Amino acid sequence: MIDTIDLLNKKFDNKYNYLKMYSVVYDKITEICTITLLYPYTLTEISEEDKQEVSNYYKDELSLNGETKVKFKKSYLDERLILEDIVKFFQQNKKGLSPYILLENISVSSNQLDVNIDIKLNQDILSLINDFELKTQLKDYLDKLYIANFIINIDENEEALPDEIVCDDILPPLTKAKRYNVNVEKKLIGGDIIPKPEYIKDNKKQKTAVILAGFLSNKNQRRFILKKGKHAGEEKALYTFSLKDIDGQIDCVYFCPKTHEKTLESLEEQTFILCVGDLKTGINGKLTYYIKRISLANPCFEEAKKEENQSIEYILNNHRQVVFPDLLPRSTQAFLFDQKVVYNDFILKNNIVVFDIETTGLDPDQCEITEIGAVKIEHGEVTERFSSFAKPKNPIPIEVQQLTHITNEMVAKAPKIEDVIIDFCDWSKDCIISGYNIVGFDLKFIKKITNKLHIPFNNTVIDAFIVAKQANIKPSNFKLGTVVKYLGLKLENAHRAFNDAYATAQVLMELNRKKTKEE
């Protein structure tokens, strides 16, 4: 990239060597290019003549069809703002280190154009990073925002030495978490661990003092030399392993004092342990469990499953049915194909629910289901229909209404999606689940609701989109409408859940008929 400040100074004999480029923003609509230049806070002001000279230079240099505006911004060395920008740097560029960067461990002091920055890190973390590289990256980041000479020091936080870790007594969290029983056999590291452990799958965010349990696997030891502080030059052990409970798994880290190395070495693969630690974003960017206490234990998963089943049974027993699937008379199936067909065992020997949903948008985390439609295939015939609107919490965007033809008025008196999904899960129990391209979209919306309700939705999934791509057919593309037309079938009122589900069922059955005929 051309350094326009350098060219500016060459033209005017370094007259403007105190300026620094802050930003260049071009608005395509107004065709205005806005250039913002920094000048040091030690400079009282820039004369109007100098501002005009610089502005004219950029207008001539850029030669844009639109307008060019040049702004001048004083670079104040406000220590509070610099501190905020340092934190922002770690949040945006060093997510793995971000949890360890506390405001109280950063100090900023300025003297004219020199700014001294001191950052304190835990000794274990300090030993795992390249502090020279980190200083360089932080300095480059700040140089773009301020006119100053940044002097960055990264040092040890001596208040948190690895061999002197203090673990406060663990208290039950304020929010109620799902827990299960374990039988503690022996304390290995630290004191007693109470109360019961949480499920690993329920912990997806950073949190302190978390109790988890599971089977240990993939244990590895890494040794490194402490670089700084009282223990500089000493060798240290870092253990990493996985912890897996009944249906979740997490990466774990334990900075091991010398006194506990034999204990960690003695833990064999698949040993069940109960732990206390903090959930933080690790250096690899993933949520990682930083362990402080460990005990040997035995799981009580059967008891936990029984409690979970009782909870599910309670939800189902106290649920008021809102969707009533209707039977499709066998005679209505005759128009599916003009001749008597023979299917393979997949169609004949399985009960299959083919479904489709309509939503307020594409993001499962932000958007909501507005309609679900499904059909059930039994022994080669479509026998039942499941169809319902669902009332979203937020209005349906106008562009989505135009695509699906589902309006806010149509869903205004519809049941809540949670009630619809409970009925759907009960109706599709013990069936294979299918649909068109559901793995990447529809299933995520369904799973979001079932996870929230803590009800099972673990059916076998067969995606008709994948079946079509693996079949011996060559449509121009593999959109549902294109495949339906290629196979000589019909799709009426596309982008309505039941119609798309019914068309997908036809595709699935036709592709299995084709396969049988070819065999």
Image: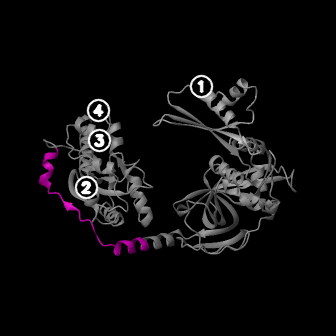
The kind of residue on which mark 1 rests is: Asp
Location of residue 210 (image quadrant): bottom right
Regarding mark 1 in the picture, which secondary structure is present there? helix
Residue at x 27% of width, y 42% of height:
512
- Assess disc 4: are there few (<14), some (14-19) or many (≥20) residues with their C-alpha within 10 Å of its C-alpha: some
The kind of residue on which mark 2 rests is: Lys
Look at mark 4 in the image and give the residue it sits on: 475
- Assess disc 3: are there few (<14), some (14-19) or many (≥20) residues with their C-alpha within 10 Å of its C-alpha: many
Of marks 4 and 2, the one in the foreground:
4
Q: Are marks 4 and 2 in contact (CB under 8 Å)?
A: no
Question: In the image, 399: left or right of 177?
Answer: left
- Taking the image as drawn, is residue 152 in sight? no
Q: Are marks 1 and 2 in contact (CB under 8 Å)?
A: no
Which badge, 4 or 3, comes first in the chain's sequence?
4
Question: In the image, 47: left or right of 477?
Answer: right
Of marks 1 and 3, the one in the foreground:
1
The kind of residue on which mark 4 rests is: Pro
**Closer to the camera in the image, 79 or 220:** 79
Look at mark 3 in the image and give the residue it sits on: 480
Look at mark 1 in the image and give the residue it sits on: 60
The kind of residue on which mark 3 rests is: Leu
Question: In the image, 497: left or right of 337?
Answer: right
Residue at x 61% of width, y 66% of height:
212
Which badge, 3 or 2, comes first in the chain's sequence?
2
In the image, the segment drawn in magenta is 310-336
Regarding mark 4 in the picture, which secondary structure is present there? loop
Q: Real-space Cα distance between discs 4 and 1? A: 56 Å
Visual colour scheme = one colour
Of marks 1 and 2, the one in the foreground:
1
Look at mark 2 in the image and give the residue it sits on: 376
